[in-house]
């Protein structure tokens, strides 16, 4: 199969990342079925896509007619069986190895044998997901960035089992989505998170030590390095629970202290201060 032949895409999970992946696939003209665990979550997923596509209209990226056409190409479902005719499936389910392994086992059963199975995981080895299927050569990582419709990158992750043909398909598929791809080996953090987590941890430690205020840390990076946002603002966007999870996985893999989540991050996660999604992280947000 060639990337230009892909018309039918499946997405598993329609949270922050999944809904963005659904949106960019529909924007590229593909028919998208997404699967969530319950009807309530299907509706929440659809609402996320509706809100984000509305923002795209308001910012002049697409017309209202294009938005309607995009939404018309998207269907939500509650069973993986609905993915039986999909040529590629991108999994963006909860970052839990057991859940993802079960999803890949089921995807291997329900999808045609030549379909490609991709995971948006930022931390679980791709080979672990590939090895529960009978097509490990057709499994790869496709790591998108938040917010997916805005960020231009996909990290392609080649497990030791992934074929060259599958990596090439991933690359060409990324181009169809309007993204640039980079390739990484299958080890925790890939390229971006391996560099990002020590930086974010460093900002938390600075705040914790009273070295500088949250505003000064963020302003310093925003204006001093021309990043669109500072590290504490970025942590609030990513979600402190997600950042802590990735930090733990990196620490497990490399045992380097700079990856270990600082105590303040752990305390904030325990307190439910997860960032924008809960209305409070390092900053406060209107929910
Ligand atoms: N479709 C298409 N375009 C959209 C859109 C949509 N649904 N929603 C917004 N946009 C466009 C806007 O039109 C705007 O485009 P323009 O610059 O051409 O006008 C652009 O996206 C920015 O949108 P907004 O104006 O609404 O937002 P801001 O200017 O406030 O920027 C931000 C917000 C994009 C989040 C920016 O601050 C940013 O880039 N922050 C850094 C984000 C980042 O680093 N993400 C990576 C996180 S790490 C990760 O995901 C990995 C994980 O494993 C941890």
Image: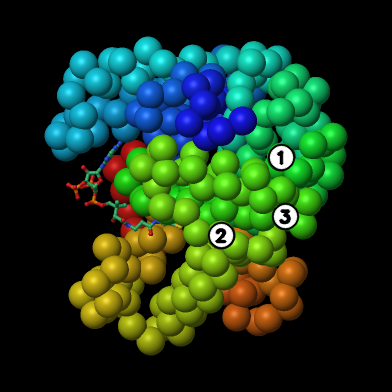
Judging from the image, what secondary structure is the residue with disc 1 in? helix
Name the residue carrying label 3: 159
Q: Position of residue 100 (x, y in %)?
A: 73, 39
What residue appears at the point 65 percent right and 43 percent down from the top-left corner?
A: 166
Judging from the image, what secondary structure is the residue with disc 2 in? strand
Query: Cα distance, mark 3 to mark 1?
Result: 10 Å
Q: In the rendered image of this protein, does residue 166 appear above or below residue 38?
A: below
Q: Depth check: give the residue in front, 188 or 114.
A: 114
What residue appears at the point 71 percent right and 40 percent down from the top-left corner?
A: 138
User: Which part of the image, by quadrant, shows the C terminus?
Assistant: top left
| Residue 59 appears in view | yes
Q: Position of residue 165 (x, y in %)?
A: 65, 45
Name the residue carrying label 2: 183
User: Residue 38 — which label?
Assistant: none
Q: Depth check: give the residue in front, 166 or 118.
A: 166
How packed mark 2 is, by other alpha carbons closer than 10 Å (few <14, some 14-19, many 20 or more), is some
Q: Earlier in the sequence, mark 3 or mark 2?
A: 3
- Which of the 4 quarters of the picture holds residue 109? top right
């Amino acid at each position: 199969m060639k990337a230009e032949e892909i018309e039918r895409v499946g997405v598993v999970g329609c949270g922050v990342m999944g809904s963005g992946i659904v949106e960019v696939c529909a924007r590229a003209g593909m028919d998208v079925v997404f699967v969530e665990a319950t009807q309530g979550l299907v509706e929440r997923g659809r609402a996320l896509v509706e809100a984000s596509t509305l923002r795209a209209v308001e910012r002049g990226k697409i017309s209202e007619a294009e938005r309607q056409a995009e939404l018309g190409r998207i269907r939500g479902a509650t069973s993986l069986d609905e993915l039986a005719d999909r040529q590629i499936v991108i999994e963006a389910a909860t970052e839990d190895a057991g859940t993802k392994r079960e999803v890949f086992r089921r995807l291997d059963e329900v999808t045609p044998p030549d379909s490609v199975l991709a995971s948006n995981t930022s931390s679980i080895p791709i080979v672990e997901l590939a090895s529960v299927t009978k097509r490990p050569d057709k499994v790869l990582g496709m790591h998108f960035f938040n917010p997916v419709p805005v960020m231009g990158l996909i990290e392609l992750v080649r497990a030791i089992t992934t074929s060259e043909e599958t990596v090439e398909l991933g690359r060409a598929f990324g181009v169809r989505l309007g993204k640039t791809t980079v390739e990484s080996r299958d080890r925790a953090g890939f390229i971006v998170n391996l560099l990002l987590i020590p930086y974010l941890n460093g900002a938390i430690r600075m705040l914790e030590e009273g070295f500088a205020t949250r505003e000064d840390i963020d302003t310093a990076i925003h204006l001093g390095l021309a990043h669109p946002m500072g590290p504490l603002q970025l942590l609030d966007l990513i979600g402190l629970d997600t950042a802590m999870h990735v930090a733990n996985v990196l620490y497990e893999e490399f045992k380097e202290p700079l990856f270990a989540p600082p105590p303040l991050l752990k305390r904030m996660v325990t307190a439910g201060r997860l960032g924008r999604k809960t209305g409070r992280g390092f900053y406060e947000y209107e929910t």
